[in-house]
Image (cartoon, rainbow, N blue to C red):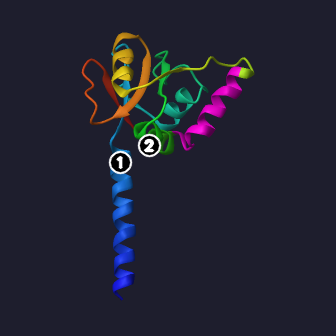
C-alpha cells in the first residue's frame, strides 16, 4: 500500500512540476507588434516558418534560443517537437528555398535585447528573465 501511495505521489508531483514549468515560458514581441494575444496555432506557424505575419497583419520575425530549458519547454508546449526535429524542419525550408534560417541567440537576455530593438521581432524566454522594453503576448 505504501509503495502504491508513494508511486502515485511521485507521478502527481512530476505532473505538477511539469505543468508549472510550461507556464513559466513567455512569448515576447517588439512593441511594434499590434497584438497583445496570439493563437497557439498562429504562434506555431510563425515560429515554424509557415507564416511571416500574425492574424492582425503584423509582419513578424521569429527569434530563437539556441538551447536551454526555456527553449525545450517552448518547443514541447507550443511547437510539439523536440529541438532536433524543429531545427530539421527549418533546414528543410531553407534547403528548399522557402525560408531563411531565423536568428538563434545564446541567451534569454540576448533575445530580450534583440526583440526590444528590432521591429516585428517575436521570441520566447522564461518568466524569470527580466523583460523590460518588450511586450508579453498572451497565448490562447
Q: Which residue is outermost to the right?
A: 96
Q: Residue at x 41, y 41 (%)?
A: 69
Chief SS of the magenta region: helix
Is 103 on the left or on the right of 35, as rendered?
A: right
The residue sitting at 44% across, 43% down in the picture is 73
The residue to which callout 1 is attached is: 21
Gap in angstroms between the C-alphas marked 1 and 2: 7 Å
- In reply to whether residue 35 is colored magenta, the answer given is no
Is residue 140 something that shows in the picture? Answer: no
**Drawn side of residue 31 relative to residue 122, left or right:** left
User: Quick check: 78 left or right of 133?
Assistant: right
Q: Counting residues from the N terminus, which is met first, the one under dot 1 or under dot 2?
A: 1
Residue 89: in magenta span: yes
Identify the residue at horizontal 63%, vertical 39% (top origin). Answer: 85
- Identify the residue at image location x=37%, y=53%: 19
Residue 101 drawn at (x, y percent): 60, 20
Between residue 23 and residue 11, name the one nearer to us: 11
Q: Position of residue 65 (x, y in %)?
A: 46, 28
* Residue stretch rendered in magenta on the structure: 79-94
Eyeballing the image, is 78 above or below 117? below
- Quarter of the image holding residue 105? top left
Q: How many marks?
A: 2
Q: Residues within 10 Å of mark 2 (few under 14, many from 20)?
A: many
Q: Where is residue 37, by image quadrant?
A: top left
In the rendered image, the quadrant that contains the N terminus is bottom left
Q: Check disc 2 and report the residue beneath it.
A: 73
Say whether marks 1 and 2 touch (CB < 8 Å): yes
Question: On screen, 40 above or below 13?
Answer: above
Q: Is residue 103 above or below residue 79?
A: above
User: Residue 36's spot in the image, x, y percent?
Assistant: 34, 26
- Image quadrant occupied by the C terminus: top left
- Residue 125 is situated, as x and y percent measured from the top left of the image, at 37, 32
Amino acid at each position: 500500500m505504501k509503495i502504491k501511495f508513494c508511486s502515485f505521489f511521485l507521478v502527481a508531483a512530476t505532473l505538477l512540476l511539469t505543468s508549472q514549468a510550461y507556464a513559466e515560458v513567455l512569448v515576447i514581441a517588439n512593441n511594434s507588434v499590434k497584438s497583445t494575444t496570439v493563437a497557439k496555432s498562429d504562434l506555431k506557424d510563425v515560429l515554424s516558418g509557415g507564416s511571416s505575419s500574425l492574424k492582425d497583419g503584423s509582419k513578424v520575425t521569429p527569434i530563437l534560443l539556441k538551447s536551454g530549458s526555456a527553449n525545450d519547454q517552448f518547443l514541447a508546449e507550443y511547437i510539439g517537437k523536440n529541438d532536433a526535429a524543429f531545427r530539421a524542419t527549418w533546414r528543410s525550408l531553407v534547403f528548399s528555398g522557402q525560408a531563411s534560417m531565423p536568428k538563434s541567440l545564446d541567451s534569454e537576455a540576448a533575445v530580450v535585447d534583440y526583440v526590444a530593438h528590432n521591429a516585428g521581432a517575436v521570441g520566447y524566454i522564461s518568466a524569470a528573465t527580466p523583460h523590460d522594453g518588450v511586450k508579453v503576448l498572451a497565448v490562447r
